[in-house]
Image: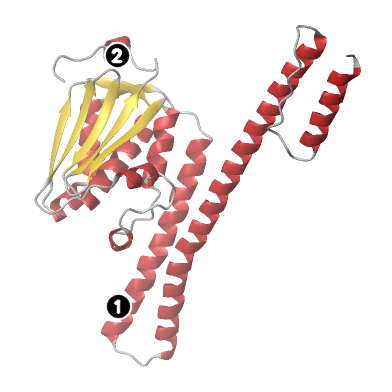
């Protein structure tokens, strides 16, 4: 009776030392051996959770590295190819300018990629400067920043601010809304509309709604992953690098908010930033009768 629980613990410890972290010990009774076994099981479960989390983080980092290598390979190949063309070919001024334009375009894409990655790194390790943010001013800043892109596709931008303000970092929220609206523009056809809204649901919510190409359910689950593209051809032509929604997710996380994506193919996408914490003023936590 005395040595059997010790033998069970010794056997389980040996298995854990060999990498088997799901081992559980069952010792009946209410004595010290039973308590020790329960503590042992909790320890083993905690180790298994940490190992699973480490494996997941390792896979995510490897996927990020693989995608980054792929993203860099394309512009570097193009830059080298056009550079060799300019160096060796006896070409006219028009072709020379065209080749130089491609080099500049690909260099800009690499610059945008590095800046986006830097933004992601900084945001993950930063603390937001929380201040009252006027929603009408926020929407006006978004419209001003994207005015040329909206005009290019003749897209009407509608705004509706049922909330007067939110508590947050104005610069980060501006970046969030510009990224979401810019994605909506890329997904939208000419002569369509995009609607920016701020309202009280069960929680204060910012919303961007478009009438664009939409996404399948499995795509919405992956769209916030770094470098993921719903339409790779469209993203390349528009200069996208697949980091915008990753950035948005991090900004939302810093504000204690959740990013919800609701999309239907060929009908459009709605992205909601739902502030689910007590960060917001109490009057913003009451459901509005207008919504």
Residue 98: assigned label: 1
Q: Picture quarter containing residue 39?
A: top right
Say which of marks 1 and 2 sits in front: 2
Q: Which residue is at 35% across, 76% downward? A: 100
Q: Is residue 196 left or right of residue 29?
A: left
Q: Quadrant of the N terminus?
A: top right
Q: Which residue is at 41% across, 65% downward? A: 107
Disc 1 crowd, CA 10 A, few/some/many (<14, 14-19, 20+): few
Location of residue 79 in the rendering, given as x and y in whole percent from the top left corner: 43, 73
Q: Which residue is at 28% across, 32% downward? A: 272
Q: Secondary structure at mark 1?
A: helix
Residue, far bottom: 90
Of 35 and 210, nearer the camera is 35
Location of residue 61 in the rendering, given as x and y in whole percent from the top left corner: 56, 48
Question: In the figure, 191 relative to 158: above or below?
Answer: below
Disc 2 crowd, CA 10 A, few/some/many (<14, 14-19, 20+): many
Q: Mark 1 or mark 2, which has the lower sequence index?
A: 1
Question: In the figure, 59 relative to 110: above or below?
Answer: above
Q: Is residue 149 visible?
A: yes
Of 5 and 254, nearer the camera is 5
Of 202 and 48, nearer the camera is 48
Of 106 and 227, nearer the camera is 227
Q: Are marks 1 and 2 in contact (CB under 8 Å)?
A: no
Q: Secondary structure at mark 2?
A: helix
| Alpha carbon distance from label 1 to label 2 | 55 Å
Q: Is residue 67 left or right of residue 90?
A: right
Residue, far top: 30
Q: Picture quarter containing residue 177?
A: top left
Q: Which residue is at 13% across, 48% downward? A: 155
Residue, far front: 1
Q: Which residue is mark 2?
A: 285
Question: In the figure, 160 relative to 179: above or below?
Answer: above
């Amino acid at each position: 009776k005395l040595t059997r629980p010790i033998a069970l613990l010794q056997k389980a410890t040996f298995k854990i030392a060999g990498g088997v972290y799901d081992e559980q010990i069952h010792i009946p009774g209410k004595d010290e051996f039973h308590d020790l076994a329960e503590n042992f099981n909790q320890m083993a479960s905690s180790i298994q959770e940490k190992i699973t989390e480490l494996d997941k983080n390792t896979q995510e980092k490897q996927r990020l590295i693989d995608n980054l290598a792929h993203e860099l390979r394309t512009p570097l190949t193009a830059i080298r190819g056009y550079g060799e063309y300019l160096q060796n070919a006896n070409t006219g001024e028009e072709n020379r300018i065209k080749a130089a334009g491609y080099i500049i375009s690909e260099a800009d894409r690499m610059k945008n990629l590095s800046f986006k990655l830097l933004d992601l790194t900084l945001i993950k390790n930063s603390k937001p400067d929380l201040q009252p943010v006027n929603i009408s001013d926020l929407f006006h800043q978004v419209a001003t920043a994207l005015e040329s892109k909206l005009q290019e596709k003749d897209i009407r931008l509608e705004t509706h601010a049922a909330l007067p303000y939110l508590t947050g970092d104005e610069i980060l929220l501006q970046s969030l809304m510009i990224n979401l609206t810019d994605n909506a523009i890329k997904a939208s056809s000419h002569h369509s509309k995009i609607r920016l809204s701020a309202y009280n649901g069960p929680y204060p919510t910012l919303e961007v709604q478009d009438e664009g190409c939409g996404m399948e359910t499995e795509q919405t689950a992956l769209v916030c992953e770094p470098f993921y593209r719903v339409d790779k051809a469209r993203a390349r032509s528009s200069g996208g690098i697949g980091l915008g929604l990753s950035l948005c997710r991090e900004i939302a996380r810093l504000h204690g908010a959740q990013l919800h994506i609701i999309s239907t193919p060929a009908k459009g996408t709605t992205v909601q930033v739902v502030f689910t914490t007590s960060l917001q003023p109490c009057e913003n936590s009451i459901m509005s009768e207008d919504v």
